[in-house]
Amino acid sequence: MEFKVELEQAKGNPADLERLYRQALSKGESEIFCETIARWVKEEPENPLFNVWAYRLGIHAIAVKEVVKEEISKKGEIQNWWLAISVSVLSGLLFTLFAGGNQPFPAPGKSNPLFWIGWSPTAALGMLFYLGATETVKDRLRWYLVSAGTIILTTLFVGAIGWNRTDDIANLLALHLPLLSWIFVGFSVVIGRTKIPGQIFGYLLKSMEIIIGSTIYLIAGMIFMALTSGIFSVLGIGVSDYILQYLMSWLIGVVPVLSLATIYDTSRSPLEQNQVTGFAPLLKTLARLLLPIATVVLLSYVCWFIPTNFWKPFTQLEAHLRQREVLIIYNATIIAIIAILLRAVPDLGEKISEKLNLILRAVVTLAGLLTLLLNTYSLAVITSRIFNFGLTPNRHAVLGWNLVTFSILSWILIKIYKVKPEKWVEALRESTYWAIIPIISWVIWVLLVLPFFYRY
């Protein structure tokens, strides 16, 4: 420490630097001397004294390489942004074309079939193009092509069987095609890497961030449109709803790739993504704040609401739509809790106290158990509906999703229970590898098999 202080005091004095250098050689502290000179060169690259010492010590070339590397990185970021903007604008134009002047709402009967079928594949293809164009490992390009080809073929299939449909099957196709697009974007960035469970977990976390980023972009765009429309109105210039619908369609198309470019670092794998920048810290804090609140809500469901209304959903369900809405809320709650559990988990390298680790594990386990009980109740109710009123497309899909969430929660809780308390985070991360399999299987079933059971 004394040598470092003395060295800093000698900064700019050639005689003192020479003396300290000889002293460093004799005492084995030359590495400290070299590190200090390298730092000075980086801070003051035009200083001739520091440059002379750098050349003498053979470290100037290293400093130059670092500067060049930083310049190349900055140029690459600028190029990536131009690419993202270009792809976003093109995607927005395609969304506008697909909407055809109708409402840009992805629901059969409310929007053009081109839009409700094509919006998520178009967004996914734009993301894949951006990811492939910015990929630094060229051997990985084949996975982006495989994902893009699969999405295109599936979209053509869905278009062929659902184009003129507005029934429950069409609604299920509209809900599940975006999930398949999301799955294959994830496949393209995860497959072929090491530590697949961690890669999948990293992709799930970044997906949450991208959804939040897209929402913020969309809200900002809508505010700008509203302000612009208001200004034109004050000036006596009317903006028709037809034009606003076109602008809204374009805005929705622009958002996905821009959000991806903002949040996802294409030079890193999903596992290596930075979790201390962007929306990651906000989401993690929010999840940990919501977790105890969600646990209290779940306790009220399981300990009070369900016991006092236990038999209502099992009887006369078709005549009581309110009970149907309650079941929808149950299933939405289950999915939301799973998302909170995944985001509340500590990041790799995050240091938390042993006490906090135990508390977090206990709360996650309790919330998971309560959610599993709620899931079991929902599963019993939907099974009862099927036996009493028949197997409709919606019940078919909901039954499958109840089984999927039941298997995911069971697997996570078993993995956490079987390991030591200090290893529970790794166990939960690894459980996502197997949890993703039933999700993929059921999405494929609903899209490619279910329509053949219920002909139009």
Image (tube, grey):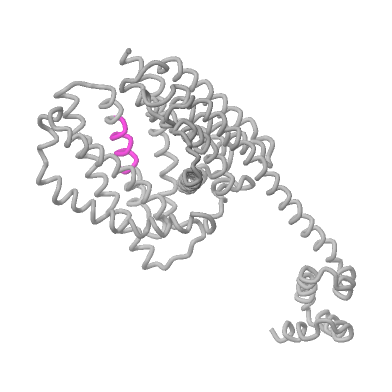
Which corner quadrant of the image does residue 422 belong to?
bottom left
Q: Is residue 393 left or right of residue 96?
A: left
Q: Is residue 163 left or right of residue 184?
A: left
| Quadrant placement of the C terminus | top left
Which corner quadrant of the image does residue 434 belong to?
top left
| Quadrant placement of the N terminus | bottom right
Q: Is residue 407 magenta?
A: yes
Image coordinates for residue 281, horizontal then vertical, percent: 47, 58
Image coordinates for residue 76, horizontal then vertical, percent: 71, 47
Residue 441 in sight: no
Q: Is residue 46 left or right of residue 198?
A: right
Q: Is residue 418 magenta?
A: no
377 up-or-down from 96: above or below: below
Residue 305 in sight: yes
Q: Main secondary structure of the magenta part?
A: helix
- Residue in view at x 58 percent, y 41 percent: 193
Q: Which residues are magenta?
A: 400-410
